[in-house]
Image (spheres, rainbow, N blue to C red):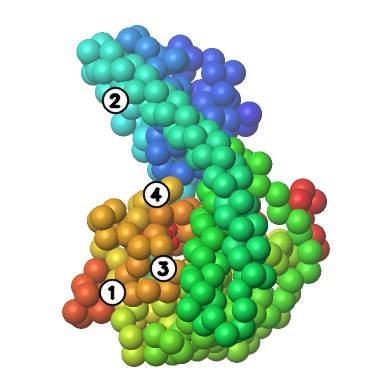
Amino acid sequence: MRLCEMTLSDLPNVLPESKEVDEFVFMVANTLKQSLPDQLYAIQLWAVRRLGADTAAASDWLLIERVLKDNVMKEMVKAFGAESVVANWSIIDRPFMYAIIETTKLASGSDNAILLDHMVNLRRQMAELDRTKSNFIQVAAHELKTPLTLLEGYANMLRDEISDNNPLMQMYVAGLDGGTARLREIIGDMIDLSMIESGSIKITHQMVYLEKVVRQVARATQRAFEHRRVELIVEPFEMEDLIFGDPERLSQVFSKVISNGLKYTPDGGQVTVRAQLVRHEEATEQLDGYIDVQVSDTGIGIAPENLERIFQSFGGVGDVALHSSGKTKFKGGGPGLGLPIARGIVDAHGGRIWAESAGFDERKKHGSTFHIELPRYKSAPAKS
Ligand code: ADP
């Protein structure tokens, strides 16, 4: 409120009222936690609805946005100190930058407003398509479960019928078991992804020792690593690693990222897990900083344009024709569900997951590092 009044008193000749500026500030604050495309969409929607083809209003708003941005910075420096503001400014600067760009477009002519309106409509249609896709995944997953249960049942019956001295038949049934287990996993992933996309994923917070979860995952994947002659190293977590989280879900995240490390590292390579305490400066009464678990591999690396794309559903970057459902086979590209699920789970814990790599090169093997950053709360977060 104070910010809005300050801003309007700096600009006595503009028409918009304090209530409208207040709404704008509220809209910007709401976008801060959104992904960049969602942030841009919210701002475009605001610009089209609030300003439409009114170029005069757009010119007023251009002034307001600039002065408001300066005032926000001044107030934040007073409250948090210049250093902290400089470190975090890009987060706040971005929505203002988007707003200024969108308003400039509107201030410079009504053709742009029509174009923008069109863009907003397209974006709405895309969101609708996305919802249809999520529904399809959900329905397909549930439909696949029934025949799968039948297959598992017949495989069990077959196993009971086979005598001990028929190794060939035993091998066939083992093959059937492997296939159905993998299919169950993929269906489980499809259901998880649709729950994440619809926001219905449940996280049951309890006390979890993070290093223990990582070591359990490492033990479970050890054989696959030995089979591929890739070394898996888990460095001791030299910190208090007790957090509040869902052990099953977190183990799903580490399992995905660690087995990807194996999958995209040629035989003879290395996958290393280490952790460090970060963002102490953001500690509050409830929060004690973040634990950044880093999973680094010596594999084929990731091209810069794919670093973000791999976290989008079906964002696998390989040729679909080369897909294999092998979980650990070198470069055995899967359906591209793992990382989006991992991101959904980490987001639901209030954390962040992202990838870094010096680029994709199968010969030079730049490797990749996945960061899984989780908040270390002092007590269980209120909402679970
Ligand atoms: P999937 O492995 O089923 O394709 P993921 O969601 O686990 O799906 O991964 C998406 C894509 O990200 C993969 O297809 C691969 O191209 C890339 N990727 C994931 N982890 C790594 C890694 N450690 N090194 C190189 N590329 C990776």
Residue in the foreground of this view, choosing between 56 and 365: 365
Q: Mark 1 or mark 3: which is in front? A: 3
Residue placed at 34% from the left, 23% from the top?
Answer: 122
Q: Earlier in the sequence, mark 2 or mark 4?
A: 2
Q: CA distance from mark 2 to mark 4?
A: 36 Å
178 vs 305: above or below: below
Q: Which residue is mark 2?
A: 104
Q: CA distance from mark 1 to mark 3?
A: 18 Å
Check disc 3: other Cα within 10 Å, few if <14, some if 14-19, many if 20+.
some
Q: Is residue 284 visible?
A: yes
Image position, residue 141 (x, y; %): 55, 44
**Does the numbered disc 1 mark a residue whose Cβ is under 8 Å from ligand 1?**
yes
Element under disc 2:
helix
Q: CA distance from mark 2 to mark 3?
A: 51 Å
**Disc 2 residue type (three-letter):** Thr
**Disc 4 residue type (three-letter):** Phe
